[in-house]
Amino acid sequence: MSKVRELEIQLERAEQQLRLFQQVSRLMTRATSFDDILHEIVELVCDFMACDSCLIYLAEDGELVLCASNAPARGNLGRVKLRLDEGLTGWVARERRLLAISREAYNDPRFKFFKDLPEDTFEAFLSAPIISQGRVVGVINVQHRLTHSHSGSDMEMLSTIGEQIGCLLVLSRLSRETAGAPV
């Protein structure tokens, strides 16, 4: 591939990434429920990353609770929970670090299997903490059924989406607190 073509592809991907960030930012200004916005973010991330799964866990009472998923059957939402010392997701929250595994994520010693999550059999795993006001308030995971190497750009993109979700969480809480209060 020529150098010019490589640069064109990189530019196109950067433009797609910018559009993704813009779409997420626009979601933050809508008068839509927090849960609906999380589900829209999951769909946007899946489309952008061409992944098979995107899951968002939020911290509640010392646990990470599955709050959004691209799975058609969303019966696991609110039911799948893990402590901060459990699984790859718990490790990301506890360590406040990004985690990328390109193959056999289910063989990682930190992995925790959930029988209700078909995603637990997927090969590749990319996860970023959701940060709000300097603290971890959740984790966003992206998974591929097959082996997949995540680029530095993909890692940065997911980290930024995690930060945007953290801001969204603050806005959502402020909105609930000020509901009914005079402006």
Image: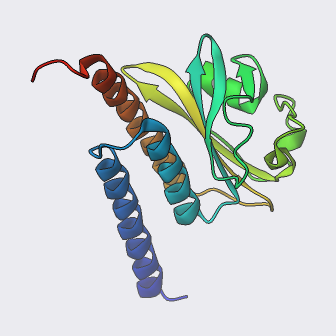
Residue farthest front in this picture:
180
Q: Is residue 163 above or below residue 148?
A: above
Residue 136 point in image, percent of width and height? 51, 22
Report which quarter residue 5 is drawn in: bottom left
Q: Is residue 107 above or below residue 109?
A: below
Q: Is residue 86 above or below residue 49?
A: above
What count of labels does the image hold? 0
Residue 95 shows up from this direction: no
Residue farthest top in this picture:
61
* Most foreground residue, 183 or 98: 183
Residue farthest left in this picture:
183
Left or right: 169, with 54 as reference point:
left
Report which quarter residue 23 is drawn in: bottom left
* Most foreground residue, 182 or 172: 182
Image point (69%, 17%), residue name: 84
Residue 30 point in image, percent of width and height? 29, 46
* Most foreground residue, 23 or 98: 23
Residue 34 point in image, percent of width and height? 43, 37
Left or right: 101, with 69 as reference point:
right
Identify the image quadrant of the C terminus. top left
Identify the image quadrant of the N terminus. bottom right
Residue 150 shows up from this direction: yes
Image point (67%, 29%), residue name: 78
Q: Is residue 44 above or below residue 80?
A: below
Left or right: 73, with 153 as reference point:
right
Residue 157 point in image, percent of width and height? 47, 51
Image point (41%, 78%), residue name: 7
Left or right: 160, with 80 as reference point:
left
Image point (37%, 35%), residue name: 168
